[in-house]
Image (cartoon, grey):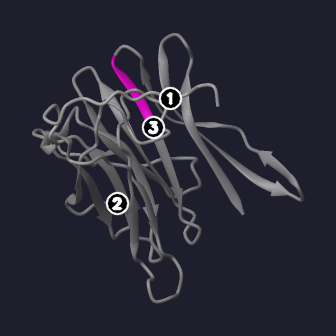
Amino acid sequence: GDFWFCALVDDNSTRNGIALVKARFAADTVQWSTPALVRSGNNSSVLFDKPWLAADSLSGRLYLSYTVFSVVADTIVFQRSSVGGTTWDNPQRLSSSAEAGYVQGSRPAVGPGGEVYVAWYSIGFVDVDYMKIRKSTDQGATFNAAVNMASVYSNFGSGAPGFNRGTGITYPSIAVDRSTGTHRSRIYMAWNESIDFYDAALGTTGSVSETEANGS
């Protein structure tokens, strides 16, 4: 019956970090506990970004992944708490050294047997980008090697329809079937992507003027 909310915090002067707060329902009222700091650092040396939290309803463990920007590059980092968020294990870097500076948008998910998955977006070095994923079979203590789940054309300059950022980085969504049905443990992932615009015949078929009648 516990609910969790995780967000970025900033004291607007010297430090930033990630905080967590627990809530429970009492009848129709949400009762929030005192927020607790998970991790913080000095603004001059580190920036924490895009935290995402998953809770295992069977064990009560909490799994948190986020991006860490240092003065050199960025990495995908993972932490877990086995005691309801009061203490956290040391951070683990999940993205590789070769990806430093080219990763974002991590998402953790929990399977029915306590297995933990973390997916993220990795910018490629030529044309194509990647969706990567790592799996843990010991409740987040260690992780298997990263797997390229898919290669995508992310169109970094615009993003998907309806996305309101000029540089729309493509992020994954992930869910794991925790039911007792036929597809138990099946992993589902979704993301936005564009066509292979590197192979498009742009500029070879003339121009088209697009106009709109604003009167109706």
Identify the magenta region. 45-50
Callout 1: few (<14), some (14-19), or many (20+) C-alpha neighbours within 10 Å? few
x, y percent for residue 58: 57, 72
Question: What's the amino acid at mark 3?
Answer: Lys
Between marks 3 and 2, how big is the CA–CA gap? 22 Å
x, y percent for residue 129: 21, 46
Question: What's the amino acid at mark 1?
Answer: Glu
Residue carrying label 3: 50
Question: What's the amino acid at mark 2?
Answer: Ala
Secondary structure under tag 1 reads: loop
Residue carrying label 1: 212
> Pointers 1 and 3 in contact (CB under 8 A)?
no
Residue carrying label 2: 141
Callout 2: few (<14), some (14-19), or many (20+) C-alpha neighbours within 10 Å? few
Secondary structure under tag 3 reads: strand
Q: Chief secondary structure of the magenta span?
A: strand
